[in-house]
Amino acid sequence: MTLKPYISAEPTFAWIKSSYSTDEGPDCVEVATPDESHVLVRDSKNPAGPRLDLTSGAWANFLPYASGH
């Protein structure tokens, strides 16, 4: 997996908050898909902070581990 900043002409993305996240809790993760080949992941408590740029394949491989299946 390569971590690198995602550079795009589009400054905003539609971020989706995890269903496990709450406004009070520490587990606040959001994802966005700026195109078919990337998934961006960030901490919703710090939207201007760092974010991960994953390939869609790496994201698909990670999801079964995140969901416990």
Image (cartoon, rainbow, N blue to C red):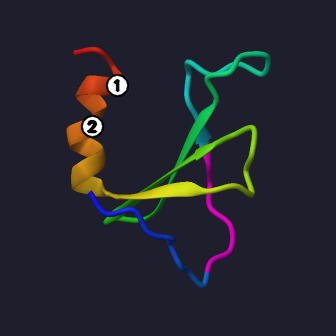
Q: Which mark is residue 46?
A: none
Query: In the image shown, does 23 or 26 lie closer to the viewer?
Result: 26
- In the image, residue 58 lies in the stretch drawn in magenta: no
**Residue drawn at x 62%, y 54% as measured from the top left:** 14
- In the image, residue 11 lies in the stretch drawn in magenta: yes
**Residue drawn at x 27%, y 37% as measured from the top left:** 62
Question: Where does the image place residue 21, in percent across and percent down from the top left?
Answer: 63, 22
Q: Quadrant of residue 18?
A: top right
Question: Where does the image place residue 16, in percent across and percent down from the top left?
Answer: 59, 41
Q: Which mark is residue 62?
A: 2
**Residue drawn at x 20%, y 40% as measured from the top left:** 61
Magenta region, main secondary structure: loop
Q: Quadrant of residue 28?
A: top right
Does the residue at mark 2 contact the one at mark 1 (Cβ under 8 Å)?
yes
Q: Is residue 58 above or below residue 17?
A: below
Looking at the rendered image, the quarter that the N terminus falls into is bottom left
Q: Is residue 6 above or below residue 23?
A: below
Question: Where does the image place residue 26, in percent across and percent down from the top left?
Answer: 68, 21
**Residue drawn at x 56%, y 22% as measured from the top left:** 19
Magenta residues, start to end: 10-15
Label 2: state its secondary structure.
Answer: helix
Looking at the rendered image, the quarter that the C terminus falls into is top left
10 Å neighbourhood of mark 1: few (<14), some, or many (≥20)? few
How many numbered discs sit on the rendered protein? 2
Considering every residue shown, the one lying at the far right of the view is: 24
Q: Quadrant of residue 56?
A: bottom left
Q: Which mark is residue 66?
A: 1
10 Å neighbourhood of mark 2: few (<14), some, or many (≥20)? few
